[in-house]
Amino acid sequence: MQRLTLILSDLFLPEERVAIGPPRTPELPALSGLLRLASPQYVGDWRRWLLQQVGGPDLPLAAICATERVSDAQLGTAWLATPVALEARLDHVRMQDRGLLYINDQERASWCAEFNRVFGPQYSLHDCGQRAFILAGLDASTTTADPARLLGAEIGPALPAADAPELRRLWAEIEMWLHGSALNDARERDRKPRLSALWLWGRNAEARGPRATGASDIGLYGGDPLIGGLGGTWQLQARETPKSLMHVEAARRHVVAEFAVVTGGPQETLAELDSNWFAAAREALASGALSLLEIVANDHCFRITHGARWRFWRPQRGWLEILAHPAATPRV
């Protein structure tokens, strides 16, 4: 393995929190040490950046994620439909702090069947893994936000604009359906959070570029729909992210591993990653077994090379301070 890309896919720092300074957080010595040596670069949307790095079909994000999950005829009307949990405040509605919901296999089948009974045949819902469904049949194209950017934040400014009437109507109808759904009542009895909405997004089209040369030499790990979509596009096996770096397929030239550090499982917490991934990656860089490490978080890519260990003069800064203020990291 020459290149390792670690994507912290739901770690976005709200602007108001950055403005008042980062809160107290646990120390993560391995991550702090790596970021201290890194060269940061603003990349914006991590999915678009990843597609530019590894290549991909010239399709909207949702269509890439829907590969091999819907028919070819439905790809042109595919949207990501992420189950989310919302909470009403006095004057607005917010996404819950851990409001991206994971749905198990049996539940997903039930939700798809119920949706298709209520909204079919015009619209249909398809399984896309634990984190999302694919909605097909909505022939519209507009920009809607990645729901991970809204964790703990007001959703109003991110809702579809008036120039997308069919999307707004369907969005509202789905919310009403979910409100009265017996499947949601069953989740409540099982002490699981109710589905407040299906967040529809990923339909806006952007150029992707050609498939990268040697794509078969890429190892893909993670539960994000894009990881699965790229695996389907390239006929590669996209695997669940293992507990530690030791369990990845080192023979691959480039390994991409995605983690939901805010909303994912216990092994995806930053504390676990610090012990099982960041520390191991630091050792691999120091020994020369790894040439390039990239940590993608908060719209930035932090690149660390084997030679970066000589930057011993850089001041000590905590990991969250660096993520919140990457521009302050020296580039020398």
Image (spheres, helix red, strand yellow):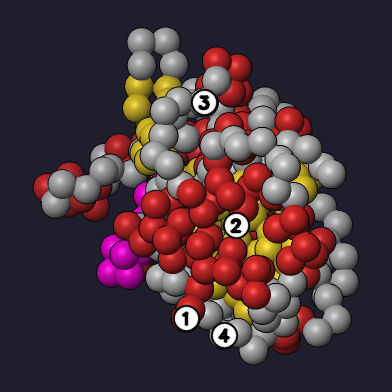
Q: Is residue 212 above or below residue 87?
A: below
Q: Nearer the viewer, mark 1 or mark 2?
A: 1
Q: Label 1 to label 2, Cα distance in Å?
A: 17 Å
- Residue 124 point in image, percent of width and height: 50, 61
Q: Label 3 to label 1, Cα distance in Å?
A: 33 Å
Of 200 and 311, nearer the camera is: 311
Instruction: Give the left or right position of residue 157, taking residue 277 as reference.
Output: right
Mark 2: give few (<14), some (14-19) or many (20+) Cα within 10 Å. many
Of 110 and 238, nearer the camera is: 238
Mark 4: give few (<14), some (14-19) or many (20+) Cα within 10 Å. some
What amino acid is found at the position of numbered circle 1 in the picture? His
Q: Which residue is mark 3?
A: 22
Of label 4 and label 2, which has the lower sequence position? Answer: 2
Q: Label 4 to label 2, Cα distance in Å?
A: 17 Å
Instruction: Give the left or right position of residue 182, taking residue 124 as reference.
Output: left
Q: Which residue is mark 2?
A: 7
Q: Dot 3 lies on which element?
A: loop
- Residue 104 point in image, percent of width and height: 31, 65
- Residue 118 point in image, percent of width and height: 38, 53
Q: Label 4 to label 3, Cα distance in Å?
A: 36 Å
Q: Which residue is mark 1?
A: 247
Q: Is residue 324 above or below residue 183?
A: above
What amino acid is found at the position of numbered circle 2 in the picture? Ile
